[in-house]
Image (cartoon, rainbow, N blue to C red):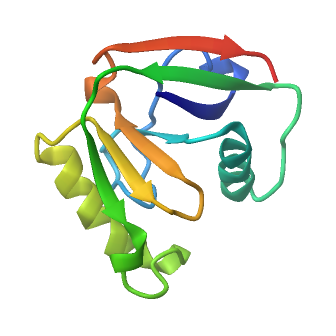
Amino acid sequence: MLVYRIAHKNYSDGLYASGIEGRWNSAGNKVVYFAESIPLAFVEIMVRRQGVGFNHDFKIMIVEVQDLEITSVDFARLKKGWRQFNNYSYCQPMGDDWYNGGKPPLLKLLRSSTGVFELPTKRATCGLQQDKVSG
C-alpha cells in the first residue's frame, strides 16, 4: 500500500515528527500524518498551512507500507463537530490510546475529511520503504 505526504524539502529525506500536538496526538507523541492520495496530501498541507507558503521548497513523499496491520476509526461514529479545531481534546485521547497501546503501527481514519493515515515514528522502521518524488 502506498501513502503520501507533502513535506518541506528539509524534511523529505526521512520520516520526521516534531511531537507537536495534532488532531490525533497530544504534545510529545511523535506522529507522522499521511494521506491515501497525492491530492488528499495536498489538501492536508494546505489546511495545516492555511494556504500560505506553498512553493518549490516542498516535495511529495511516497511511502510503501508493507504487511502491516491497520487500526481503523470510523469517523461516522465520532461526535458531531469532531473536525473543528476546538475539538482536538476529543480526538487526541483516542489517538493517544492507539499510540501508547501497542496497537498496529497505522491508524486509518475511514472516510475522514482528509483521508489521513498516521504513523508513529517510534515504529517507523517496520517494513517501510521511502521513495521521494519532486513535486
Asked if 21 appears above or below 19 in the picture, the reply is: below
Horizontal and vertical percent for residue 95? 29, 56
Along the viewing direction, whichever of 69 and 61 lies nearer the viewer: 69
Q: Residue at x 70, y 37 (%)?
A: 38
Asked if 122 appears above or below 50 in the picture, the reply is: above
Residue found at the far left of this picture: 101
Q: Quadrant of residue 23?
A: bottom left
Q: Quadrant of residue 84?
A: bottom right
Along the viewing direction, whichever of 48 and 124 lies nearer the viewer: 124
Q: Quadrant of residue 121?
A: top left
Horizontal and vertical percent for residue 99? 22, 46
Q: Residue at x 24, y 65 (%)?
A: 93
Horizontal and vertical percent for residue 131? 59, 11
Along the viewing direction, whichever of 110 and 79 lies nearer the viewer: 110
Q: Residue at x 26, y 27 (%)?
A: 122
Residue found at the far bottom of this picture: 80
Residue found at the far right of this picture: 55
Q: Residue at x 72, y 16 (%)?
A: 133
Q: Is residue 28 left or right of residue 42?
A: left
Horizontal and vertical percent for residue 42? 73, 44
Asked if 26 appears above or below 99 in the picture, the reply is: below
Quadrant (top left, top right, bottom left, bottom right) of the C terminus: top right
Asked if 52 appears above or below 10 in the picture, the reply is: below
Total marks in image: 0
Q: Is residue 56 left or right of residue 10?
A: right
